[in-house]
Amino acid sequence: MTDFAQAVQDILAAGQRMDNRGWVPATAGNISRRLADGRIAITRSGGHKGFLQAADVITVDENGKPHDAGNRPSAETLLHCQIYQQDPSAGAVLHGHSVASTVLSMIEPTEALQLSDYEVQKVFEGQTTHDATLAVPLFRNDQDIARLAREVAPHFGVMPAGYIIRGHGVYVWGKDMPTALARLEGLEFLLACLLERRKLGV
Ligand SMILES: CSC[C@@H](O)[C@@H](O)C(=O)COP(=O)(O)O
Ligand SMILES: [Zn+2]
């Protein structure tokens, strides 16, 4: 199987998994995988990520330009390209719109969601104990993706392999698709816990 064919399988399976968990409502979310030759396999813009077909995955260069000019990649392709440029170890990027990430990022007055005392924090690199604090940065939503990317830029190297756009959703990445999926699942679990606690007022 070619690297691209494997990436297509990875992306379709990730879309189904994210849809099953309720993280990609309507046409929300986008998914990509870096190929060994440096190209990026990414979802087309606008499709439902739970029902992706092989033809819904296309390739772009490191700047987000589609190799076939007729293809329209995800509207947020630049955010994926930025992650691959800033983190050479990144091999897969996932973006979803869960209820917890949307609601918590809208009501949090500070610049980050602080997660501590949770065992599951350890899905993120550098988190070796529940005693540590995982600070997931929050960025203002912006339809100008290049401007949004400039807001995110200074945080690489400081933030964990994930961030949240307010009222919008999460970006998470990892060295490969299983790692990115595990981080997304871990982060969504933590956000769900935080939301429950806010509802309980504790
Ligand atoms: C349901 S609207 C969501 C979009 O505006 C966007 O945020 C999104 O996540 C999906 O965009 P896409 O261009 O399909 O990758
Ligand atoms: Zn989105």
Image (spheres, rainbow, N blue to C red):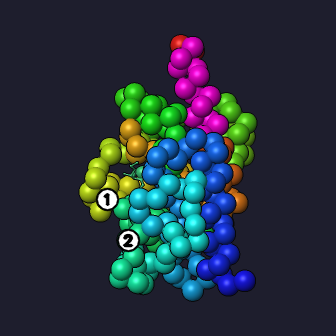
Using the image, tell me which numbered label, if any, was put on residue 84: none
Which quarter of the rendered picture does the N terminus lie within? Answer: bottom right
Left or right: 128 with respect to 8?
right
The range drawn in magenta is 188-200
The answer to whether one can see residue 118 in this image is yes
Which quarter of the rendered picture does the C terminus lie within? Answer: top right
What secondary structure predominates along the stretch shown in magenta? Answer: helix
**Which callout, 2 or 1, points at the residue further toward the start of the chain?**
2
Image coordinates of residue 78 in percent, x first then y, are: 38, 66
Q: Is residue 118 above or below residue 37?
A: above
Residue at numbered disc 1: 145
Which one is in front, 125 or 64?
64
Rate crowding at label 2 as few (under 14), some (14 to 19) or many (20 or more) other CA atoms within 10 Å: some
Q: Secondary structure at mark 2?
A: loop
Residue at numbered disc 2: 72
Residue at the spot 57% in from the left edge and 34% down from the top edge = 191
Q: Is residue 6 above or below residue 124?
A: below
What's under tag 1, amino acid-wise?
Ile
Which one is in front, 184 or 70?
70
Left or right: 198 with respect to 7?
left
What's under tag 2, amino acid-wise?
Arg
Q: CA distance from mark 2 to mark 1?
A: 15 Å
Residue at the spot 63% in from the left edge and 42% down from the top edge = 21
Rate crowding at label 1 as few (under 14), some (14 to 19) or many (20 or more) other CA atoms within 10 Å: some
Q: Nearer the viewer, mark 2 or mark 1?
A: 2
Q: Secondary structure at mark 1?
A: helix
Residue at the spot 63% in from the left edge and 54% down from the top edge = 16
The answer to whether one can see residue 163 in this image is no
Whether residue 198 is in magenta: the answer is yes
Residue at the spot 50% in from the left edge and 54% down from the top edge = 48
